[in-house]
Image: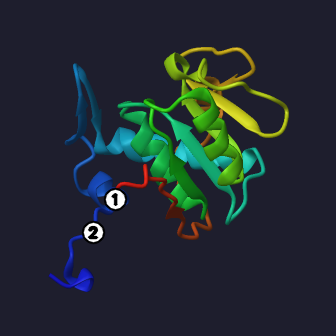
């Protein structure tokens, strides 16, 4: 099938058509399309409040967190490059990726944040709890608008592989 004919997952379209439909199931957690859309919009607002601009990089270390998709949608809606990092990597490997992708922000699950050494060089955000040197993301999300941003330039994905692909 040509790429031009491939179906596109438009989160906003799904959220408008069926906001109560389950979008993500992760263990016993469920996120509906409407919730995912609002969370992505809130996260995009946080990224902008932090001063992230089109072309900046956000690295993530989230494991299998449903919120990871909201963070991804938020990055894409802000014109950011998203660099997901594997939880199987070592601390030196993770810091190499953060430096190499020129991240301006890192979003890490509190369970994984201990693999990283936060410093003052960029924004370190923790999800699902506090981590030393990190700012908890949940209070920022709670205070942010769930409405779409006025300008949503497309972002992109920046993937690292182990070199075996």
Quarter of the figure with the N terminus: bottom left
Residue 152 image position (x, y, % from top left): 57, 66
Of residues 46 and 127, the one nearer the viewer is: 127
Where residue 8 is drawn, which disc sits there?
2
| Image side of residue 144 versus residue 127, left or right | right
Where residue 103 is drawn, which disc sits there?
none
Callout in the foreground (1, 2): 1
Q: Residue at x 60, y 28 (%)?
A: 91
Quarter of the figure with the C terminus: bottom left
Q: Residue at x 59, y 37 (%)?
A: 93
Residue 161 visible, this angle: yes
Label 2: which secondary element: loop
Q: Quadrant of residue 16 in the image? A: bottom left
Which residue in the protein does label 1 denote? 165
Residue 14 image position (x, y, % from top left): 27, 56
Q: Residue at x 72, y 60 (%)?
A: 53
């Amino acid at each position: 099938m040509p790429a031009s004919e491939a179906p596109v997952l438009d989160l906003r379209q799904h959220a408008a058509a069926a906001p109560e439909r389950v979008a993500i199931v992760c263990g016993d957690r469920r996120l509906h399309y409407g919730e995912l859309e609002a969370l992505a919009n809130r996260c995009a607002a946080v990224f902008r409040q932090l001063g992230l601009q089109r072309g900046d990089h956000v690295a993530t270390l989230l494991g299998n967190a449903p919120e990871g998709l909201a963070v991804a949608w938020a990055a894409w809606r802000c014109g950011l490059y998203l660099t997901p990092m594997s939880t199987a990597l070592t601390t030196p490997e993770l810091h190499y990726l953060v430096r190499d992708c020129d991240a301006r922000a890192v979003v890490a699950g509190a369970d994984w944040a201990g693999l990283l050494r936060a410093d003052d060089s960029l924004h370190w955000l923790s999800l699902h709890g506090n981590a030393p040197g990190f700012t908890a993301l949940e209070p920022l999300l709670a205070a942010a608008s769930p409405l779409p941003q006025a300008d949503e330039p497309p972002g992109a994905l920046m993937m690292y592989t182990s070199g075996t692909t």
